[in-house]
Image (cartoon, grey):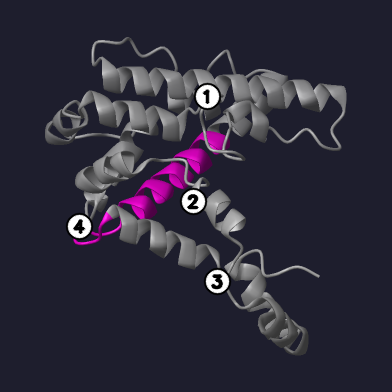
Amino acid sequence: MSPFKSERQRKWMYMNKPAEAKRWTKKYGSKIKKEEKKMNEQQMRYSTTELSLIKNTFAENQDLLKILRKHFLQLPLTENETNQLHNFNPEILKLLRRFFLPTLEGDEPLNQIIDLWMTVNLQDKNLDMILVHVTARRIVINYLEQQLSILEDKDIKLDINFKDFINPDVEINKGWNTYSNLIARNTIVQHVEQQLTQIYLLAGTKDETPSETLERLKKNSNK
């Protein structure tokens, strides 16, 4: 028997095994193990400084997130929206890379290291399907690299057109490529929405401090 290792475990025990939870509390107390608290503090992938930057840029600014969506999905942008995209400072551009095209970094918190190759689902697929999905993921990565590079340098040439992924008249949509391109297209849409949602949640509100944001996210994860 051991003391509570997390707030989530403590709540679960009181809900599902109240008698045992009370015995644990009586014997060990209700406090979470310090070692576990220390580990939990290391779980956030973004530093307080980075959270402040996210908050200062995106808090209560869904319009700016929608402009980013338009950019990543190559949807029509007004001149004013295009200018807003090219006004991002270098630190925000670095953060956007970490969101949309993460790479393996040795200094990331434990259990937070990730890149887009890690999320390719190859389970229960034959070799032909594996090749299709690997090709699709390579397309996704190349496309995101292009869109991020355009944010960093507006003079970058557009080589990959989002609309071509499902254009039957384009040469790339032949045979197995049709399947790879459709998977790539849908993966890009889902990935962009997921990252924009994550930025929105991390940004919170203007009157919320980074510490309060972290506390809110921790509470939500324990529900």
Q: Which mark is residue 206?
A: 4
Residue type pointed to by label 2 = Glu
Residue type pointed to by label 4 = Lys
* Residue beneath the point at 24% across and 52% down: 59
**Quadrant of the rendered image containing residue 91:** top left
- Badge 3 vs badge 4, beta-carbon distance below 8 Å: no
* Residue beneath the point at 61% across and 69% down: 8
* Residue beneath the point at 19% across and 25% down: 86
Instruction: For marks 3 and 4, give the CA distance.
Output: 24 Å
N-terminal-most mark, 3 or 2? 2
Specify few, some or many for label 1: CA neighbours under 10 Å numbering under 14, 14-19, or 20 or more.
some
Residue that numbered label 2 is attached to: 41
Main secondary structure type of the part rendered in magenta: helix
- Badge 1 vs badge 2, beta-carbon distance below 8 Å: no
Give, as a single range, the part of the protein colored magenta: 186-209
Question: Is residue 102 one of those drawn in magenta?
Answer: no
What is the x, y in percent for residue 187?
56, 36
Instruction: For marks 1 and 2, give the CA distance.
Output: 22 Å
Instruction: For marks 1 and 4, give the CA distance.
Output: 30 Å
In this rendering, position of residue 22 left or right of residue 45: right
